[in-house]
Amino acid sequence: MTKLSVNINKIATLRNARGGNMPNVVQVAKDAEKFGAQGITIHPRPDERHIRYQDARDLKPIVTTEFNIEGNPIDKFLELVLELKPTQATLVPDAVDAITSNAGWDTVKHKDYLKEVISELKRNGIRTSIFVDPTLEMIEGAAHTGTDRIELYTEDFAHQYSIGSTDAVKPYAQCAELAHKLGLGINAGHDLSLQNIQFFKQHVPHLLEVSIGHALVCEALYEGLESVIHQYLAKLK
C-alpha cells in the first residue's frame, strides 16, 4: 500500500487568516493520524505565511507516524530540520516568494550542492527526498546526489488528467521504473486529489508515499476530514 502523508499547511493558512489558534494545527495532525493517515507533512517557508517554525517544533513530539518536513534548504530550514530530526526531509527548490512549489530540482546543475546537503541530513539519520520533474535525465541526476528518494512533481499530470488526457501519466511511470532500478524510493505530490489519485497509483509503479494537502483540505470542507482520509486510503490500496 502507498502511504498517505497529509500536508497540513492549509490548516495553518486558515488559522493565520484570523489569528488565534483556530483551527489548531497540532490537533488536526493528531486527528489525521487517528483517522488513518500514515504521515504528516509540513512545508514552512521563510515568511511563515502558513506553517510557522514553531509549529514544526510543536508537532515533533506528537506525530507518531512519519514526520516529513519540506522546504528549500536555506540555512534557517536546515537548522530546523537538524534540530528536529524528522523521519524525512524533502528538498524543494521553491523561491522565497513562490505561492506554491512550481518546479523540481535540476539535479545535474545542482548535483554538488544537493550532495552536500543530503550527506549532512543522512549523517543525522534523516531520510532524504528531492522534488523532481518527471524527466529521465533528472532521475538519473538524482541517483548521483545520494538521496534516498525522489518526489515526483505531479502538477502537470493533474492538469492534463483533469482535461481528459490519460497519457499524461506515462512520463511518471517511466521515471518511477528508472528510479526503482537506480535504487531510489518514489514519492509523489502536488495537485493529487480524490479524482486522480487512484488512476495515478494504478499506473505509477513502486509508489511509496503521496503527500496531499490543498485538495484534501478542500475536499474535507464538504465531506469531513475523517471521510476524506478514509477515501484516500481506500484508493491507495
Image (cartoon, rainbow, N blue to C red):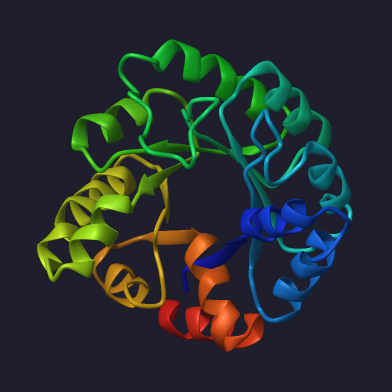
Q: Residue visible at 54% across and 67% down?
A: 4
x and y, in percent, of residue 52 in the image: 77, 41
Q: Is residue 63 visible?
A: no
Q: Quadrant of the C terminus?
A: bottom left
Closest to the observer, 14 or 147: 14
In this view, 11 is above or below 118: below
Name the image quarter holding residue 27: bottom right
In this view, 42 is above or below 182: below
Q: Left or right: where does residue 68 sit relative to residue 168? A: right
x and y, in percent, of residue 54 in the image: 85, 40
x and y, in percent, of residue 2 in the image: 47, 68
Q: Is residue 200 visible?
A: yes
Q: Left or right: where does residue 125 sit relative to residue 109? A: right
Q: Residue visible at 62% across and 57% down?
A: 10
Name the image quarter holding residue 110: top left
x and y, in percent, of residue 138 in the image: 27, 31
